Image (spheres, coloured by chain):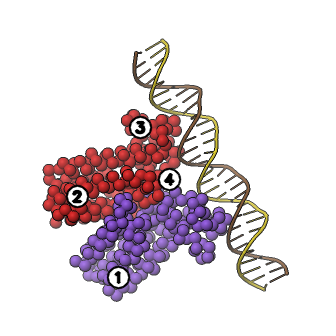
Chain colours: A red, B purple, C yellow, D brown
DNA sequence: AGAATATTGTACCAATCGGTACAGAAAGGT
DNA sequence: ACCTTTCTGTACCGATTGGTACAATATTCT
Protein backbone atom coordinates (compact mmCIF):
# COMPACT_ATOMS: atom_id res chain seq x y z
CA UNK A 1 0.00 0.00 0.00
CA UNK A 2 1.37 3.38 -0.98
CA UNK A 3 2.39 5.88 1.65
CA UNK A 4 0.06 8.60 0.41
CA UNK A 5 -2.90 6.28 0.54
CA UNK A 6 -2.27 4.98 4.03
CA UNK A 7 -1.64 8.48 5.35
CA UNK A 8 -4.95 9.82 4.10
CA UNK A 9 -7.00 6.83 5.25
CA UNK A 10 -7.76 8.08 8.78
CA UNK A 11 -9.05 11.43 7.53
CA UNK A 12 -11.00 9.65 4.81
CA UNK A 13 -12.53 7.30 7.35
CA UNK A 14 -13.66 10.12 9.62
CA UNK A 15 -15.16 11.90 6.62
CA UNK A 16 -17.38 8.97 5.70
CA UNK A 17 -18.17 8.31 9.34
CA UNK A 18 -19.22 11.89 9.98
CA UNK A 19 -21.04 12.72 6.76
CA UNK A 20 -22.10 9.34 5.33
CA UNK A 21 -21.46 8.25 1.78
CA UNK A 22 -23.66 10.78 -0.02
CA UNK A 23 -22.68 13.61 2.29
CA UNK A 24 -18.97 13.09 1.67
CA UNK A 25 -18.15 15.13 -1.42
CA UNK A 26 -14.79 15.12 -3.13
CA UNK A 27 -14.41 18.74 -2.11
CA UNK A 28 -14.76 17.69 1.51
CA UNK A 29 -12.31 14.84 1.01
CA UNK A 30 -9.66 17.09 -0.49
CA UNK A 31 -10.13 19.51 2.39
CA UNK A 32 -9.92 16.77 5.04
CA UNK A 33 -6.99 14.89 3.56
CA UNK A 34 -5.09 17.82 2.09
CA UNK A 35 -4.77 15.89 -1.17
CA UNK A 36 -5.79 17.21 -4.58
CA UNK A 37 -7.95 15.30 -7.00
CA UNK A 38 -4.89 14.21 -8.93
CA UNK A 39 -3.46 12.42 -5.92
CA UNK A 40 -6.79 10.99 -4.89
CA UNK A 41 -7.61 9.51 -8.27
CA UNK A 42 -4.08 8.22 -8.53
CA UNK A 43 -4.55 6.30 -5.28
CA UNK A 44 -8.19 5.39 -5.97
CA UNK A 45 -8.66 5.07 -9.74
CA UNK A 46 -12.24 3.90 -9.30
CA UNK A 47 -13.26 6.98 -7.36
CA UNK A 48 -15.45 7.45 -4.31
CA UNK A 49 -16.77 3.91 -4.31
CA UNK A 50 -13.28 2.52 -4.03
CA UNK A 51 -12.37 5.01 -1.33
CA UNK A 52 -15.19 3.78 0.88
CA UNK A 53 -14.44 0.16 -0.01
CA UNK A 54 -10.82 0.56 1.11
CA UNK A 55 -11.94 2.35 4.26
CA UNK A 56 -14.31 -0.51 5.10
CA UNK A 57 -11.59 -3.08 4.50
CA UNK A 58 -9.28 -1.12 6.77
CA UNK A 59 -11.91 -1.01 9.52
CA UNK A 60 -12.52 -4.74 9.24
CA UNK A 61 -8.78 -5.38 9.33
CA UNK A 62 -8.45 -3.27 12.46
CA UNK A 63 -11.19 -5.18 14.24
CA UNK A 64 -9.76 -8.51 13.09
CA UNK A 65 -6.35 -7.78 14.56
CA UNK A 66 -7.33 -5.65 17.56
CA UNK A 67 -10.57 -7.28 18.67
CA UNK A 68 -11.40 -10.59 17.03
CA UNK A 69 -7.99 -12.24 17.16
CA UNK A 70 -7.26 -11.32 20.81
CA UNK A 71 -10.73 -12.59 21.68
CA UNK A 72 -10.10 -15.89 19.95
CA UNK A 73 -6.63 -16.33 21.42
CA UNK A 74 -7.51 -15.34 24.97
CA UNK A 75 -6.65 -18.00 27.51
CA UNK A 76 -9.41 -16.84 29.79
CA UNK A 77 -12.57 -16.31 27.67
CA UNK A 78 -14.40 -14.01 30.10
CA UNK A 79 -11.32 -11.81 30.50
CA UNK A 80 -11.02 -11.76 26.71
CA UNK A 81 -14.57 -10.49 26.33
CA UNK A 82 -13.88 -7.83 28.93
CA UNK A 83 -10.95 -6.67 26.85
CA UNK A 84 -13.26 -6.63 23.84
CA UNK A 85 -15.49 -4.20 25.73
CA UNK A 86 -12.46 -2.08 26.57
CA UNK A 87 -11.34 -1.95 22.94
CA UNK A 88 -14.86 -1.28 21.69
CA UNK A 89 -15.46 1.50 24.17
CA UNK A 90 -12.14 3.10 23.28
CA UNK A 91 -12.72 2.75 19.54
CA UNK A 92 -16.14 4.39 19.61
CA UNK A 93 -14.99 6.98 22.13
CA UNK A 94 -17.82 6.20 24.53
CA UNK A 95 -20.46 6.63 21.88
CA UNK A 96 -19.24 9.97 20.56
CA UNK A 97 -17.96 8.22 17.43
CA UNK A 98 -20.49 6.57 15.15
CA UNK A 99 -20.11 3.10 13.65
CA UNK A 100 -19.61 3.47 9.91
CA UNK A 101 -20.80 -0.08 9.25
CA UNK A 102 -23.97 0.60 11.18
CA UNK A 103 -24.49 3.98 9.54
CA UNK A 104 -24.23 2.50 6.06
CA UNK A 105 -26.71 -0.23 6.94
CA UNK A 106 -29.53 2.26 7.23
CA UNK A 107 -29.51 3.85 3.79
CA UNK A 108 -29.75 2.56 0.25
CA UNK A 109 -26.02 2.44 -0.48
CA UNK A 110 -25.94 -0.48 1.95
CA UNK A 111 -26.53 -2.74 -1.05
CA UNK A 112 -23.32 -1.68 -2.75
CA UNK A 113 -21.23 -2.50 0.31
CA UNK A 114 -23.35 -5.32 1.69
CA UNK A 115 -20.45 -7.80 1.61
CA UNK A 116 -18.18 -5.59 3.71
CA UNK A 117 -20.93 -4.88 6.21
CA UNK A 118 -22.12 -8.46 6.52
CA UNK A 119 -18.59 -9.78 6.89
CA UNK A 120 -17.82 -7.33 9.68
CA UNK A 121 -20.83 -8.15 11.82
CA UNK A 122 -20.80 -11.84 10.98
CA UNK A 123 -17.18 -12.26 12.04
CA UNK A 124 -17.78 -10.36 15.23
CA UNK A 125 -20.80 -12.45 16.18
CA UNK A 126 -19.01 -15.65 15.23
CA UNK A 127 -15.90 -15.10 17.32
CA UNK A 128 -17.93 -13.77 20.22
CA UNK A 129 -20.20 -16.82 20.13
CA UNK A 130 -17.19 -19.15 20.15
CA UNK A 131 -15.71 -17.33 23.11
CA UNK A 132 -18.97 -17.47 25.05
CA UNK A 133 -19.12 -21.21 24.40
CA UNK A 134 -15.59 -21.52 25.70
CA UNK A 135 -16.77 -19.63 28.76
CA UNK A 136 -19.35 -22.33 29.37
CA UNK A 137 -22.44 -21.03 27.59
CA UNK A 138 -24.72 -23.45 25.81
CA UNK A 139 -24.36 -23.22 22.02
CA UNK A 140 -27.57 -21.50 20.97
CA UNK A 141 -27.64 -19.39 24.15
CA UNK A 142 -24.15 -18.18 23.24
CA UNK A 143 -25.20 -17.30 19.71
CA UNK A 144 -28.19 -15.28 20.89
CA UNK A 145 -26.26 -13.53 23.64
CA UNK A 146 -23.61 -12.55 21.11
CA UNK A 147 -26.37 -11.21 18.89
CA UNK A 148 -27.76 -9.30 21.87
CA UNK A 149 -24.37 -7.82 22.69
CA UNK A 150 -23.80 -6.58 19.14
CA UNK A 151 -27.29 -5.12 18.94
CA UNK A 152 -26.88 -3.43 22.32
CA UNK A 153 -23.61 -1.84 21.25
CA UNK A 154 -25.10 -0.57 17.99
CA UNK A 155 -28.23 0.69 19.71
CA UNK A 156 -26.22 2.39 22.43
CA UNK A 157 -24.21 4.19 19.77
CA UNK A 158 -27.38 5.38 18.07
CA UNK A 159 -29.11 6.44 21.27
CA UNK A 160 -26.02 8.12 22.72
CA UNK A 161 -25.63 10.25 19.62
CA UNK A 162 -29.36 10.90 19.32
CA UNK A 163 -29.67 12.17 22.88
CA UNK A 164 -26.12 13.57 22.85
CA UNK A 165 -25.29 11.69 26.02
CA UNK A 166 -22.17 9.46 26.11
CA UNK A 167 -23.23 8.11 29.51
CA UNK A 168 -25.84 5.98 27.74
CA UNK A 169 -23.11 4.13 25.87
CA UNK A 170 -21.00 3.69 28.98
CA UNK A 171 -23.93 2.36 31.01
CA UNK A 172 -24.82 -0.09 28.24
CA UNK A 173 -21.31 -1.52 28.16
CA UNK A 174 -21.34 -1.72 31.95
CA UNK A 175 -24.64 -3.65 31.90
CA UNK A 176 -23.25 -6.10 29.35
CA UNK A 177 -20.15 -6.61 31.48
CA UNK A 178 -22.32 -7.30 34.50
CA UNK A 179 -24.46 -9.86 32.70
CA UNK A 180 -21.32 -11.72 31.72
CA UNK A 181 -20.19 -12.26 35.29
CA UNK A 182 -23.44 -12.95 37.09
CA UNK B 1 -52.85 20.91 6.44
CA UNK B 2 -53.43 20.89 2.71
CA UNK B 3 -54.53 17.78 0.93
CA UNK B 4 -51.59 17.73 -1.45
CA UNK B 5 -49.12 17.95 1.37
CA UNK B 6 -50.64 15.20 3.48
CA UNK B 7 -50.98 12.93 0.48
CA UNK B 8 -47.31 13.15 -0.43
CA UNK B 9 -46.03 12.75 3.13
CA UNK B 10 -45.84 8.94 3.19
CA UNK B 11 -43.82 8.82 -0.04
CA UNK B 12 -41.64 11.65 1.23
CA UNK B 13 -41.05 9.83 4.50
CA UNK B 14 -40.00 6.62 2.79
CA UNK B 15 -37.65 8.59 0.56
CA UNK B 16 -35.77 10.10 3.49
CA UNK B 17 -35.87 6.80 5.35
CA UNK B 18 -34.43 4.87 2.42
CA UNK B 19 -31.88 7.34 1.10
CA UNK B 20 -31.08 9.60 4.04
CA UNK B 21 -31.13 13.38 3.86
CA UNK B 22 -28.23 13.89 1.47
CA UNK B 23 -29.22 10.96 -0.71
CA UNK B 24 -32.75 12.26 -1.18
CA UNK B 25 -32.57 14.61 -4.18
CA UNK B 26 -35.48 16.71 -5.37
CA UNK B 27 -35.51 14.63 -8.54
CA UNK B 28 -36.07 11.54 -6.43
CA UNK B 29 -38.78 13.30 -4.44
CA UNK B 30 -40.67 14.37 -7.55
CA UNK B 31 -40.44 10.81 -8.85
CA UNK B 32 -41.61 9.26 -5.58
CA UNK B 33 -44.44 11.70 -4.88
CA UNK B 34 -45.52 12.40 -8.44
CA UNK B 35 -45.44 16.12 -7.68
CA UNK B 36 -43.54 18.71 -9.69
CA UNK B 37 -41.24 21.27 -8.16
CA UNK B 38 -43.97 23.87 -8.37
CA UNK B 39 -46.26 21.87 -6.13
CA UNK B 40 -43.48 20.88 -3.79
CA UNK B 41 -42.24 24.40 -3.22
CA UNK B 42 -45.79 25.59 -2.85
CA UNK B 43 -46.30 23.11 0.00
CA UNK B 44 -42.78 23.51 1.42
CA UNK B 45 -41.60 27.08 0.71
CA UNK B 46 -38.42 26.52 2.70
CA UNK B 47 -37.36 23.53 0.63
CA UNK B 48 -35.80 20.22 1.56
CA UNK B 49 -35.06 21.19 5.14
CA UNK B 50 -38.71 21.89 5.76
CA UNK B 51 -39.76 18.68 4.03
CA UNK B 52 -37.68 16.62 6.43
CA UNK B 53 -38.78 18.73 9.39
CA UNK B 54 -42.45 18.10 8.58
CA UNK B 55 -41.75 14.41 8.08
CA UNK B 56 -40.07 14.21 11.48
CA UNK B 57 -42.97 16.02 13.13
CA UNK B 58 -45.37 13.60 11.49
CA UNK B 59 -43.40 10.61 12.76
CA UNK B 60 -43.31 12.02 16.28
CA UNK B 61 -47.04 12.69 16.11
CA UNK B 62 -47.69 9.13 15.00
CA UNK B 63 -45.72 7.70 17.90
CA UNK B 64 -47.37 10.08 20.34
CA UNK B 65 -50.85 8.98 19.39
CA UNK B 66 -50.20 5.34 18.50
CA UNK B 67 -47.54 4.36 21.03
CA UNK B 68 -46.91 6.86 23.81
CA UNK B 69 -50.48 7.79 24.66
CA UNK B 70 -51.80 4.19 24.74
CA UNK B 71 -48.83 3.29 26.92
CA UNK B 72 -49.59 6.09 29.34
CA UNK B 73 -53.32 5.37 29.44
CA UNK B 74 -53.04 1.61 29.77
CA UNK B 75 -54.82 0.26 32.82
CA UNK B 76 -52.44 -2.67 33.01
CA UNK B 77 -48.86 -1.33 32.55
CA UNK B 78 -47.26 -4.63 31.51
CA UNK B 79 -49.97 -5.26 28.93
CA UNK B 80 -49.47 -1.70 27.70
CA UNK B 81 -45.78 -2.31 27.15
CA UNK B 82 -46.58 -5.51 25.30
CA UNK B 83 -48.79 -3.49 22.98
CA UNK B 84 -45.93 -1.05 22.53
CA UNK B 85 -43.80 -3.95 21.32
CA UNK B 86 -46.58 -4.98 18.94
CA UNK B 87 -46.89 -1.49 17.51
CA UNK B 88 -43.12 -1.06 17.25
CA UNK B 89 -42.64 -4.38 15.52
CA UNK B 90 -45.43 -3.59 13.07
CA UNK B 91 -44.13 -0.08 12.41
CA UNK B 92 -40.58 -1.19 11.63
CA UNK B 93 -41.84 -4.23 9.72
CA UNK B 94 -39.72 -6.64 11.76
CA UNK B 95 -36.57 -4.69 11.12
CA UNK B 96 -36.96 -4.38 7.37
CA UNK B 97 -37.78 -0.71 7.80
CA UNK B 98 -35.12 1.59 9.20
CA UNK B 99 -35.71 4.19 11.91
CA UNK B 100 -35.34 7.63 10.34
CA UNK B 101 -34.60 9.24 13.70
CA UNK B 102 -31.83 6.74 14.30
CA UNK B 103 -30.48 7.08 10.78
CA UNK B 104 -30.23 10.84 11.07
CA UNK B 105 -28.43 10.56 14.40
CA UNK B 106 -25.39 9.04 12.76
CA UNK B 107 -24.44 11.73 10.28
CA UNK B 108 -23.67 15.41 10.49
CA UNK B 109 -27.13 16.70 9.58
CA UNK B 110 -28.17 15.41 13.00
CA UNK B 111 -27.32 18.86 14.35
CA UNK B 112 -29.90 20.57 12.17
CA UNK B 113 -32.69 18.31 13.40
CA UNK B 114 -31.37 17.64 16.89
CA UNK B 115 -34.51 18.94 18.55
CA UNK B 116 -36.82 16.61 16.65
CA UNK B 117 -34.56 13.64 17.30
CA UNK B 118 -34.04 14.34 20.99
CA UNK B 119 -37.72 14.97 21.57
CA UNK B 120 -38.68 11.68 19.94
CA UNK B 121 -36.35 9.50 21.98
CA UNK B 122 -36.75 11.51 25.17
CA UNK B 123 -40.54 11.20 25.11
CA UNK B 124 -40.33 7.50 24.41
CA UNK B 125 -37.94 6.86 27.27
CA UNK B 126 -39.96 9.08 29.59
CA UNK B 127 -43.30 7.41 29.05
CA UNK B 128 -41.74 3.96 29.10
CA UNK B 129 -39.99 4.73 32.38
CA UNK B 130 -43.25 5.92 33.92
CA UNK B 131 -45.05 2.79 32.81
CA UNK B 132 -42.31 0.55 34.20
CA UNK B 133 -42.59 2.35 37.52
CA UNK B 134 -46.33 1.77 37.46
CA UNK B 135 -45.53 -1.89 36.86
CA UNK B 136 -43.59 -1.95 40.10
CA UNK B 137 -40.04 -1.18 39.00
CA UNK B 138 -37.83 0.93 41.20
CA UNK B 139 -37.35 4.45 39.79
CA UNK B 140 -33.77 4.37 38.55
CA UNK B 141 -34.04 0.71 37.55
CA UNK B 142 -37.03 1.68 35.42
CA UNK B 143 -35.14 4.52 33.76
CA UNK B 144 -32.21 2.30 32.87
CA UNK B 145 -34.37 -0.56 31.65
CA UNK B 146 -36.27 1.88 29.42
CA UNK B 147 -32.91 3.07 28.11
CA UNK B 148 -31.92 -0.52 27.52
CA UNK B 149 -35.15 -1.27 25.65
CA UNK B 150 -34.77 1.72 23.31
CA UNK B 151 -31.13 0.89 22.64
CA UNK B 152 -31.98 -2.75 21.98
CA UNK B 153 -34.66 -1.79 19.49
CA UNK B 154 -32.35 0.60 17.67
CA UNK B 155 -29.50 -1.89 17.65
CA UNK B 156 -31.76 -4.68 16.45
CA UNK B 157 -32.86 -2.50 13.56
CA UNK B 158 -29.27 -1.79 12.62
CA UNK B 159 -28.11 -5.38 12.95
CA UNK B 160 -31.15 -6.82 11.16
CA UNK B 161 -30.56 -4.58 8.17
CA UNK B 162 -26.80 -5.07 8.26
CA UNK B 163 -27.07 -8.85 8.19
CA UNK B 164 -30.26 -8.75 6.14
CA UNK B 165 -32.02 -10.97 8.67
CA UNK B 166 -35.38 -9.83 10.10
CA UNK B 167 -35.26 -12.70 12.60
CA UNK B 168 -32.71 -10.75 14.60
CA UNK B 169 -35.23 -7.99 15.20
CA UNK B 170 -37.99 -10.43 16.10
CA UNK B 171 -35.77 -12.31 18.55
CA UNK B 172 -34.70 -9.05 20.19
CA UNK B 173 -38.29 -7.98 20.76
CA UNK B 174 -39.08 -11.45 22.08
CA UNK B 175 -36.20 -11.28 24.56
CA UNK B 176 -37.35 -7.88 25.80
CA UNK B 177 -40.87 -9.23 26.25
CA UNK B 178 -39.51 -12.11 28.24
CA UNK B 179 -37.45 -9.93 30.55
CA UNK B 180 -40.57 -7.94 31.33
CA UNK B 181 -42.49 -10.94 32.63
CA UNK B 182 -39.84 -12.89 34.48
C1' DA C 1 23.69 12.68 -14.71
C1' DG C 2 19.84 11.21 -17.34
C1' DA C 3 16.02 8.40 -18.59
C1' DA C 4 11.89 6.26 -16.91
C1' DT C 5 8.26 6.26 -13.67
C1' DA C 6 5.21 7.83 -10.24
C1' DT C 7 2.87 11.63 -8.22
C1' DT C 8 0.52 16.01 -8.10
C1' DG C 9 -1.99 20.62 -9.06
C1' DT C 10 -4.97 22.80 -12.19
C1' DA C 11 -8.13 23.54 -15.66
C1' DC C 12 -11.90 21.59 -17.42
C1' DC C 13 -16.17 18.52 -18.36
C1' DA C 14 -21.17 17.06 -18.55
C1' DA C 15 -24.59 16.05 -15.21
C1' DT C 16 -27.01 17.04 -11.33
C1' DC C 17 -27.82 19.71 -7.23
C1' DG C 18 -31.39 22.81 -4.61
C1' DG C 19 -33.99 26.61 -5.70
C1' DT C 20 -36.59 30.52 -8.39
C1' DA C 21 -39.72 32.79 -11.82
C1' DC C 22 -43.71 32.78 -13.89
C1' DA C 23 -47.40 31.79 -17.09
C1' DG C 24 -51.24 29.12 -17.25
C1' DA C 25 -54.60 25.84 -15.17
C1' DA C 26 -57.90 24.70 -11.29
C1' DA C 27 -60.65 25.81 -7.67
C1' DG C 28 -63.47 28.67 -4.78
C1' DG C 29 -66.20 32.69 -3.51
C1' DT C 30 -69.49 36.15 -4.91
C1' DA D 1 -70.88 34.60 -15.09
C1' DC D 2 -66.89 36.79 -12.90
C1' DC D 3 -62.77 37.76 -10.17
C1' DT D 4 -59.54 36.17 -6.85
C1' DT D 5 -56.77 32.86 -4.97
C1' DT D 6 -54.43 28.65 -5.01
C1' DC D 7 -51.99 25.32 -7.34
C1' DT D 8 -48.88 23.24 -10.85
C1' DG D 9 -45.75 22.32 -14.99
C1' DT D 10 -41.84 24.13 -17.29
C1' DA D 11 -37.97 26.69 -18.29
C1' DC D 12 -34.26 28.39 -16.20
C1' DC D 13 -30.48 29.80 -12.63
C1' DG D 14 -25.78 29.59 -10.40
C1' DA D 15 -23.35 26.31 -7.68
C1' DT D 16 -21.64 21.91 -6.91
C1' DT D 17 -21.34 17.08 -8.05
C1' DG D 18 -18.01 13.04 -9.41
C1' DG D 19 -14.72 12.44 -12.74
C1' DT D 20 -11.02 13.29 -16.67
C1' DA D 21 -6.96 15.28 -19.18
C1' DC D 22 -2.66 16.62 -18.96
C1' DA D 23 1.35 19.31 -18.16
C1' DA D 24 4.54 20.00 -14.51
C1' DT D 25 6.90 18.19 -10.76
C1' DA D 26 9.13 14.60 -7.72
C1' DT D 27 10.99 10.32 -7.28
C1' DT D 28 13.36 6.19 -8.54
C1' DC D 29 16.35 3.33 -11.24
C1' DT D 30 20.39 2.54 -14.13
Residue indicated by mark 3: A5
- Inspect this view and state whether residue B153 appears: yes
Query: What residue sits 53% from the left and 65% below the top?
Result: B52
Q: Quadrant of the C terminus of chain B?
A: bottom left
Residue indicated by mark 4: A22
Q: Contact, CB < 8 Å: mark 3 with mark 4?
A: no
The alpha-carbon separation of the residues under discs 1 and 4 comes to: 40 Å
> With A126 as the anchor, is B117 left or right in this view?
right
Query: Mark 3 and mark 2, same subunit?
Result: yes
- Name the subunit of mark 4: A
Query: What residue sits 33% from the left and 67% below the top?
Result: B167
Estimate the x, y position of residue B53 in percent, counting from the top left.
53, 67
- Kindly report which numbered mark, 1 or 2, lies closer to the viewer in this rendering: 2
Mark 2 residue crowding within 10 angstroms, few (<14) / some (14–19) / many (20+): many
Query: Mark 1 and mark 4, same subunit?
Result: no
Residue indicated by mark 1: B80
In this rendering, is residue B69 above or below D16?
below
Amino acid sequence: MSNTLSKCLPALTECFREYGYEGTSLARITAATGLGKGSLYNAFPEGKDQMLAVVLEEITLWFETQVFAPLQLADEPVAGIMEMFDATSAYFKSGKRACLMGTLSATQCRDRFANHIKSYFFQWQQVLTDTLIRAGWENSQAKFFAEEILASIQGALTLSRALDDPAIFDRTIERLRHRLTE
